[in-house]
Image (spheres, coloured by chain):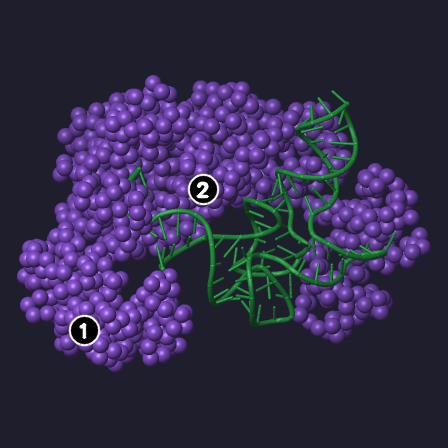
Chain colours: A purple, B green
Amino acid sequence: MREIEEKWLKVWESGRIFEANPDARKKFFITFPYPYVNGPPHLGHAYSFCKADVMARYKRMRGYNVLFPFAFHATGEPIMGVAERIRRGEAKQKEILLDAGVSEGDVEKFKDPLFIVSYWREKWLNCIKRYGGSIDWRRSFITTDITPTYSKFIEWQYRRLKALGYVVQGTHPVIYCPNCRSPTGDHDRLEGEGESPEEYVLIKFRMGDFILPAGTFRPETVFGVTNLWINPDETYVRVQVDDEKWIVSKQAAEKLKEQLRDVQLLGDVRGSELVGEVVNEPINNRGIMILPASFVSGESASGIVMCVPAHAPYDWVALEDLKRNERTLENFQIDPLYVGALTPIKIIETEGLGANPAGEVCERLGVASQADEELLEKATSEVYRKEFHSGKLNETCGTYAGLTISQSKEKLTQDFVAGGIADSMWDTVNKVVCRCNTKCIVKILENQWFLKFSDEEWKEKVKKAMEKMVFIPEAVRSQFLNTIDWLRDKACARRSGLGTKLPWDKEWIVETLSDSVIYMAYYTIAKVLNESKIPAEALTDEVFDYIFLGKGDIYKVESSQLPTAKISEMRREFQYWYPVDLRVSAKDLVQNHLTFFVFHHTALFEERYWPKGIAVNGYVNVRGQKMSKSKGNFVTLPQALEQFGADAARFILMYAGEGLDDPDWTPSDIGKHSQKLDQFLATIDEIKSLGWEETRIDKWLVSRMQMNVRRATEACEELRTRSALQAGFFDMLNDVKWYLKRGGRNRNTMQKVFSTISKLISPIVPFTAEEAWGRLGGSESIFKSSWPSFDPMLLNDEVELGEELMVKTISDIKQILELVGKTPGKIHLYVAPNWKRKLMLMVSQNKGKDHRELIILAMADPEIKKKGNDAVALIGRLVKELNRIPENLLAAEAEHFALRHSKEFLEEQFDCKFEIQLAEKPEHDPANKAKNAMPMKPAIFIE
RNA sequence: GCUGGGGUACCCUAGUCUGGUCCAAGGGGCAGGACUUAGGAUCCUGUGGCUUAGUGCCCUCGUGGGUUCAAAUCCCUCCCCCAGCACCA
């Protein structure tokens, strides 16, 4: 197999058959997201890439001029991170590299980020080539200022976006590590994965000059507040916040400082000192008491919580606990009668919940005390869910009565804030800890650069683009549309890492997801840039404007030192290749990269250059599990190639899955499959020894082939590679098997069938297909031949039905033989008469009519009428088995002919004599079996 | 939690939109047989249970209900798995 690979790689390379230049043909531009080169390709890459390669090869054979380029991504933090860790001599990092196959000597060189990039680029390049990637390598490049022309391109992109108003400066809350002094992304966290900043509403309770802001997500509950909770053991502080004096937990004060507040500390105060004080709630100015609760944490929001016992199980239980806890009440000198008199104030009416929803649910679930955290969680979510979905605010809530919870939330918040009785602060619901082991907070970043994805007009444009786009599978469309809706402004610049500097603010580097969205346009000109060694300085904005936007006059693109011929060549390339016809990627990029890709295109390019299609696929599992280094089932592409070879790897992956499913790679199955390919080649070598005799079965095979061609073609169009292999390979070969079994021996037919199979599988297993094509007599690459076409003229229903009849009859005979357990001397077959066929068709065409009607209908036919009771009995049976009536029937004569024609074959199969008769006038029917004959189901008698 | 995709036999999977021909295609595994000195490869047969000179019965497509003459397929409940949820590639 290895030699075959080498051989064809050379042919492809020297024939330059994947190098694409504009010509008169229709074009097809397909791309694969350039990989981030901080490691070797793994099976996940191999899977998505192969899908793209299959499409590229398929389209070539369909007559398209296909451009499939490839490049390498290096911007961002991780590569810098690796270099940094090697520089610091981290053993773990070194081990990771050694594991990935880096030699001891090279590891040292990983101190240099540029070395890392070139090292992995080299590995990738060789690997993709050997894998059979049909790439035009002349257009390759590496991002970052390793390729200064690329940086120029990105600068152009951002200047254009800024001019359009799509890059703006703004403020934004992020989870932030005070120690690292930088935002803490999900993967940078020891704890709190998936947490995001949440905005708490702070309800302002007054206590003299001071405000105690209680944090909540449910501002409506202020109508049902009975008291405030404070943790007596926490430290609180008096602070000046902007122009008000607040009391909040110590931690809250620190957080507020990072949230664009002017915070001045005035002094500490123990939580216990606050307990027993009375505050005024802001709605009706009722005085309510501050009571102690251990479940309140200073870490969470303001450290002050409203108690709403009617609707919050925690509050209800805590209050009940407190009522019973005489010692605590005494300690804090709280009047037990006062506390005892606190009763839940119900503010939400929900069907199925009574006067005290929280209390009732707690009682039902058996919550005994505050210590029952698990049960309390359950109770909370139950009450919340019911109230949120079907609850309505009651008259306690004044003008808000009648609103549902979801309706009221936003309105209440707005009104309260406007009325000065509420404020807000950001925090995370659960604890987040940075990799450096520091607890993170929410910080509001200022003067950050954003892509204005929230812009409604922009969103509309993207939706418009997507309306016309092809999505493979179609199911992902809704996912994209959803993404557009929830997309908010996206920070597009960072302070550190590799990449292109924001042209107008060199402090910032364009963030990596934001510098990789329109580079497909760069591919179209990369050939010229690479081959003509065009210097970066020559690529001014005017040049790009002309090439990509058709703006300006080529003779006036003066700021550039470029010859006009080069500029117009690039313009031509762009105009020819754009738009991108299909972008192929795994499903994890849907909500980010792929959506951004459409956003940027709609912002920058003319409508006719907007992307035309996106194909999305699943994630490769290995032995049923998600691939991961820690599970020890991480498989790199070089390993797979070494072990199985390119075609076997491609075959398995493409057969493993399609659509959004996660394909599975199970090494033990793989050897089997690569043998299938060898076997395929071996069979081709045997064709030479066949003769020229042509029979009915040749017609059958050619007829069957038509449908398989059609199915395989349809599957390729939609990148359903599994189905393509099923139809184009497995089903075809199964038919060949039957053909041979039935005595098919025609060299022409076999040549035709095997050439067709070779073509159908060539996008998936290009090496094997080339080899097969060559052995079948093809003189040049199979990829220069054209895709097989479906020819309805070669379909032959009668022959196909005849074979179906054979298969069924054989299996029936076998079944009987098995039951009887005797060796057959002679087997008689009786073909059903035509009136049974008529009756069958009549019944199946009159579904829904009742028995009587059918009988009347049947008796109208003189031929059937003659059969009288037999016909009536048959109608009864047919109605019962309505769903089993085959759609296509052979006439009795055709059936008789088909069986007689295959008599020898049957005799060979069962090693006994066969007699084929018409059931209507059997010559020999001692067991009276002939009457059982049914169309497509001859009666059988075994002697 | 939110959004999207899923759960089919020993395993991987097709079928679901458009209900009936579905005990449910295909591949793998396993078992038996043929060929071979043997192993490998290849080929054939079998792979829910029962029953029978046949075209039959019962049980099965995550769970539990419902609609229908008829449900893997349509509707509802619940459970479980995967991806994404952003300043990170």
Mark 2 and mark 1 lie on one chain; the one further toward the N terminus is 1
Q: Secondary structure at mark 1?
A: loop
Can you say whether A538 is above or below A938 in the image?
A: above
Residue A43: horizontal and vertical position, in percent? 45, 35
Residue A716: horizontal and vertical position, in percent? 51, 41
Tag 2 and tag 1, C-beta contact below 8 Å: no
Residue A696: horizontal and vertical position, in percent? 75, 39
Q: Which of B23/A149 is in front?
A: B23
Mark 2 Cα-neighbour bin, 10 Å: few <14, some 14–19, many ≥20: some
Q: What residue lies at 49% left-to-right and 38% top-to-bottom?
A: A622
Mark 1 Cα-neighbour bin, 10 Å: few <14, some 14–19, many ≥20: some
Dots 2 and 1 on the same chain: yes
Is residue A55 in view?
Answer: no
Can you say whether A677 is above or below A337 in the image?
A: above
Residue A241, quarter of the rendered image:
bottom left
Residue A710, quarter of the rendered image:
top right
Q: Chain of mark 2?
A: A
Q: Which of B55/A576 is in front?
A: B55
**Which quarter shows the N terminus of chain A?**
top right
Image mark for residue A626:
2
Q: Secondary structure at mark 2?
A: strand
Q: What residue lies at 24% left-to-right and 80% top-to-bottom?
A: A341
Is residue A214 rendered to the left or right of residue A47? left
Is residue A225 rendered to the left or right of residue A504? right
Q: Chain of mark 1?
A: A
Q: Amino acid at mark 1?
A: Ile
Is residue A447 in view?
Answer: yes
Image mark for residue A334:
1
Is residue A818 rendered to the left or right of residue A614? right
Counting every numbered tag in the picture gives 2
Residue A300, quarter of the rendered image:
bottom left
